[in-house]
Image: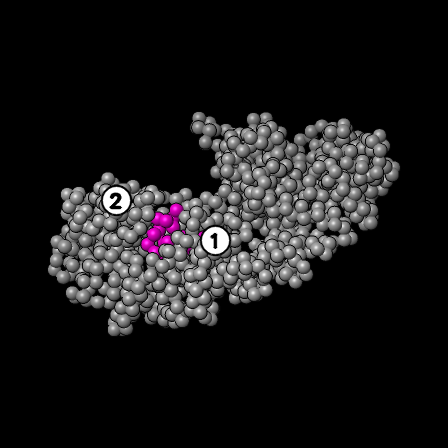
């Protein structure tokens, strides 16, 4: 298309009344290209945005950007939104990157993109491997970020130009709104132009981008009468009188495109620029756009009209041959029509068979398209759908035209729309897929395909519209004669949609009903597993003990054949852990479930049970094994492009594992990353609640109570109770914040309610939810007798569960409400248990508490040893407030802190490994001490360090060392 502000094919004219805009372009390019004496990294880019109505000169300005950028040696990526293509996902992204990608082979693409290739390839128009699956939109956007960032760095300096951004497809617009602000950190200048009054509703993020930080885009104003007069003078000569020049401004409103087009027609007509020719001037002005433009095209002949219609239907940059076919013209007749339309400044291009043909300006394209009679336009879209299929342009291009045709029950149409939906899903564009499938449903599909189309439609809208998904999937289940495999898949997805809509009771009911109806034993078992899972997640389950007994009975009769049986083992292990059964029982079932591994990204099974299995290991004092499983799960999600809720859970819960191991700084970084992803997914989603609770616990452990309060208030964490079971329990986490703020009474009331809720459901494990430990602390001052009773009961439950960390934590809580010799005895035992656990932060807490009690008891030497160890542990964990307390206690004892005696490292020392290997073979402390020639106290401490580093208790040392998990850090 020609530049809408007047830089036509007849020669480039300096832009008029655009000085500020041109100055901004020069300044931005100078910042991008001029590095002075600094290194290449000194380059920095930015963002320029131009806004104005149609014809206001946006394209001319972007033409200047391109010209100046090329002159300075910049690499230019450019694209343009299209009115007919704005629903084709990633259409604009492909315009930007395909010219660059076309110069390399698939092998080179794979080498450059690495693990991002299969995620991003479908979105940018490359061929991805079969069976890779559908990435989520977040993963595709992240992949595009990586691809464009890499290109900007490799081809610096780089300029990205996008014209008619208001017609950009929603997927590109969403990506661009998030990526463009990063241009300031890259050697890339992003320049955008759009019509503000035509920005679609989903363009809110783009509008905020354009008006970022309180600034506004450059608003392109109409030309003044003086400016129009100068253009008239430059175009038509000095003979143009003042009335004629003023009338040129009046009839165009100062619109640059209309001014230039009008003057071209005046010159072509040979009209003298005098006052007496003003009536004819007005007639010419009416032919620039609207009905006058259509009349002008009609004067060119029927073939020209049909060719213009066909070009408007096909959209931007179509081929002459394709336009000729839709217009039903022969080759010579079509070429003649293109020539006439080109001379009339309606079309551009098409001078040879390989050169695309397009309209001179989008205003012309819009006017022509809207002028096509309705029935004819519909028929031309139908013909275009067939033609683009035969031309090999893909199902997505076909679907654009089929969206404009009436529903006639054509199986071919349904097949094309379903294939287009599959293409869009592989591209990470579920909303575009949903539109195709909704149109396929209206066709309607053949009777036997209706359930499958409803299923596909439900799957495509699962993340965006879970309530609508439920309706589609329920309707799919109501269809007769559904194949058993499809019925099972529909039921699974329906339960998933209900669960993601906080309707877990309905999810459990759906799978229970299918289990009763199915004639397949395999399907019944699968549905039972799903039912147990959704009931376990329910916060309102009426009879959890009954479910637990049924689950235990079923698990005892299974052998582990197939995923359904292994998933039931995983659920049984999780249930045993939550109920506080011996940890050995929970671990036995977790091992059976794990087998040779559980996938996080199996579309037919979900990732919930694999996550529960990994967390069972964590709660059972095997966090090293849990960390290994989470690291593998996160890598699997990233390879598949699942960078939304799944990845948020992965980072968040990996952070929780690190927190329970005492690596608070690492834990905080991971959970912050998980929360950022959760915030991108949506507000008050489960991933967000998990991240908030864990992050608040970490901040409290690090002594940053004010930050924890600010976080809770920002997200209303203490006010909203999730409908699902969340771990750590949100109410219990919030009471930890209240206790840190000294609000004991409020904490007591909330914890009493938590206890009543969990006890009724048989969830009695203090390692999973330490509500009794917090309640004991809340009651310590006001009701010490009740506090001691709560602590004693929690300790009994912890001993039943049997992990070293659970018993140690309960002993510390009991010591908090005890005094004198009893307090010392409880602390001594608590530290002994924690030394045999992987819980480094809890051990540091116990050591500091023990040292403080010893100091108060008049035992300064014993106190000093524990306090020094507690200080080292607190510093190693990143628990700043605990370290400060240890220093204060040392000062109170008249001692100064010594330098730390070990470095922050995860690798086992030679002594630690030797001691751990002897312990793994079943040798006791005395035997190890005798064989290695060291005292028993040293053996205990070396074993304690080995447990913390490997991520296990004493019982798990053998397996952990065999798997080589020491030093595991994750991704």
- Judged left or right of residue 563, residue 81 is right
Q: Image quadrant for the N terminus?
A: top right
- Judged left or right of residue 62, residue 508 is left
Image location of residue 557, percent across then percent down: 44, 61
Along the line of sight, which residue is nearer the eye, 388 or 509? 509
Q: In this view, does 875 lie above or below 712?
A: above
> Which residue range is magenta in the image?
607-628
Q: In this view, does 148 lie above or below 778?
A: above
Task: Give me the residue at 78% from left, 45% from top.
Answer: 382
Secondary structure type for disc 2:
helix
Task: Give me the residue at 47% from left, 53% from top.
Answer: 561
Q: How far apart are marks 2 and 1 (CA)?
A: 34 Å
Along the line of sight, which residue is nearer the eye, 167 or 649? 649
Circle 1: is it few (<14), some (14-19), or many (20+) Cα within 10 Å? Answer: few
- Label 2 belongs to which residue? 917
Magenta stretch: dominant secondary structure: helix
What's the mark number on residue 561? 1
Along the line of sight, which residue is nearer the eye, 115 or 51? 115
Image location of residue 910, percent across then percent down: 24, 39
Q: In this view, does 103 lie above or below 783?
A: above
Secondary structure type for disc 1:
loop
Residue 615 colored magenta? yes
**Residue 322 in view:** yes
Q: Image quadrant for the C terminus?
A: top left
Q: How many marks?
A: 2
* Circle nearer the viewer, 2 or 1: 1
Task: Give me the residue at 30% from left, 58% from top.
Answer: 803
């Amino acid at each position: 298309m020609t530049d809408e502000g007047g830089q036509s094919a007849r020669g480039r004219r300096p832009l008029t009344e655009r000085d500020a805009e041109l100055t901004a372009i020069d300044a931005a390019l100078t910042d991008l290209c001029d590095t002075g004496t600094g290194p290449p990294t000194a380059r920095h880019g930015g963002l320029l945005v131009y806004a104005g109505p149609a014809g206001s000169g946006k394209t001319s300005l972007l033409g200047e950007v391109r010209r100046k950028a090329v002159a300075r040696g910049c690499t230019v990526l450019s694209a343009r939104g299209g009115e007919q293509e704005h629903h084709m996902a990633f259409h604009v992204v492909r315009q930007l990157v395909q010219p660059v990608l076309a110069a390399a082979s698939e092998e080179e693409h794979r080498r450059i993109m690495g693990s991002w290739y299969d995620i991003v390839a479908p979105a940018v128009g490359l061929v991805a491997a079969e069976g890779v699956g559908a990435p989520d939109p977040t993963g595709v956007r992240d992949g595009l970020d990586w691809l464009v960032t890499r290109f900007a760095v490799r081809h610096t300096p780089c300029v990205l130009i996008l014209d008619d951004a208001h017609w950009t497809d929603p997927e590109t617009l969403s990506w661009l709104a998030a990526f463009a602000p990063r241009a300031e950190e890259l050697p890339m200048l992003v320049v955008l132009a759009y019509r503000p009054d035509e920005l679609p509703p989903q363009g809110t993020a783009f509008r905020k981008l354009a008006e970022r930080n309180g600034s506004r885009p450059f608003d392109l104003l109409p030309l003044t009468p003086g400016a129009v007069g100068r253009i008239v003078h430059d175009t038509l000569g000095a003979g143009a009188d003042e009335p004629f020049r003023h009338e040129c401004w009046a009839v165009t409103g100062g619109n640059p495109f209309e001014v230039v087009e009008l003057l071209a027609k005046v010159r072509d007509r040979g009209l003298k620029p005098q006052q007496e020719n003003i009536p004819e001037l007005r007639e010419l002005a009416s032919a620039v756009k609207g009905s006058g433009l259509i009349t002008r095209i009609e004067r060119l002949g029927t073939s020209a009209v049909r060719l213009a219609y066909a070009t408007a239907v096909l959209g931007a940059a179509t081929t002459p041959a394709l336009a000729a076919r839709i217009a039903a013209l022969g080759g010579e007749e079509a070429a003649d029509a293109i020539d006439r339309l080109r001379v009339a400044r309606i079309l551009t291009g098409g001078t040879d068979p390989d050169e695309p043909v397009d309209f001179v300006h989008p205003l012309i394209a819009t006017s022509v398209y809207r002028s096509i009679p309705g029935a004819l336009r519909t028929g031309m879209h139908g013909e275009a759908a067939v033609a683009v299929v035969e031309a090999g342009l893909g199902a997505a291009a076909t679907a654009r035209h089929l969206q404009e045709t009436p529903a006639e029950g054509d199986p071919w149409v349904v097949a094309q729309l379903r294939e287009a939906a599959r293409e869009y899903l592989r591209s990470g564009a579920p909303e575009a897929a949903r539109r195709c499938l909704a149109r396929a449903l209206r066709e309607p599909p053949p009777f036997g395909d209706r359930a499958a189309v409803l299923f596909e439609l439900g799957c495509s809208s699962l993340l965006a519209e879970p309530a609508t998904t439920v309706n589609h999937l329920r309707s799919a289940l109501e269809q007769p004669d559904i194949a058993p495999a499809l019925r099972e898949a529909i039921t699974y997805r329906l339960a998933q949609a209900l669960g993601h809509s906080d309707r877990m009771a309905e999810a459990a009911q759906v799978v229970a009903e299918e289990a009763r109806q199915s004639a397949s034993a395999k399907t019944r078992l699968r549905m039972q597993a799903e039912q147990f899972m959704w009931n376990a997640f329910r916060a309102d389950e009426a009879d959890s003990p009954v479910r637990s007994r049924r689950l235990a009975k079923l698990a005892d009769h299974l052998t582990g054949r197939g995923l359904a049986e292994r998933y039931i083992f995983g659920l049984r292990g999780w249930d045993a852990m939550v109920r506080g059964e011996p940890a050995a029982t929970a671990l036995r079932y977790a091992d059976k479930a794990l087998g040779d591994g559980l996938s996080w990204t199996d579309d037919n099974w979900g990732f919930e049970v694999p996550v529960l299995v990994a967390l069972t290991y964590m709660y059972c004092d095997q966090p090293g094994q849990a960390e290994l499983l989470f690291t593998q799960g996160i890598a699997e999600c990233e390879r598949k492009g699942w960078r939304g809720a799944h990845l948020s859970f992965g980072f968040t819960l990996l952070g929780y594992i690190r927190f329970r191991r005492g690596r608070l700084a690492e834990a905080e970084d991971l959970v912050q990353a998980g929360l950022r992803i959760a915030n991108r997914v949506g507000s008050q989603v489960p991933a967000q609640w998990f991240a908030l609770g864990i992050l608040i616990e970490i901040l409290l452990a690090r002594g940053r109570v004010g930050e924890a309060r600010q976080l809770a208030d920002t997200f209303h964490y203490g006010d909203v109770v999730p409908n699902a079971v969340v771990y750590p329990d949100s109410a219990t986490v919030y009471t930890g914040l209240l206790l840190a703020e000294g609000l004991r009474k409020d904490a007591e009331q909330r914890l009493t309610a938590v206890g009543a809720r969990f006890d009724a459901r048989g969830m009695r494990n203090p390692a999973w939810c330490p509500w009794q430990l917090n309640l004991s602390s809340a009651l310590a001052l006001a009701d010490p007798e009740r506090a001691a009773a709560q602590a004693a009961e929690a300790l009994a439950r912890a001993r039943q569960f049997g992990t070293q960390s659970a018993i140690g934590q309960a002993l510390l809580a009991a010591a908090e409400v005890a005094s004198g010799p009893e307090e010392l005895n409880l602390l001594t035992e608590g530290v002994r248990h924690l030394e045999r656990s992987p819980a480094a932060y809890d051990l540091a807490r116990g050591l500091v508490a023990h040292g403080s009690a010893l100091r108060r008891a008049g035992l300064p030497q014993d106190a000093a040893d524990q306090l020094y160890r507690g200080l080292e542990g607190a510093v190693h964990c990143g628990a700043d407030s605990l370290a400060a307390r240890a220093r204060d206690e040392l000062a109170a004892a008249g001692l100064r802190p010594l330098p730390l005696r070990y470095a922050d490292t995860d690798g086992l020392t030679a002594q630690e490994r030797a001691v751990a290997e002897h312990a793994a073979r079943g040798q006791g402390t005395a035997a190890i001490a005798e064989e290695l020639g060291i005292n028993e106290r040293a053996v205990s401490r070396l074993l304690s360090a080995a447990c913390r580093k490997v991520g296990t208790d004493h019982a798990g040392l053998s397996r952990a060392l065999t798997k080589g998990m020491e030093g595991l850090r994750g991704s």
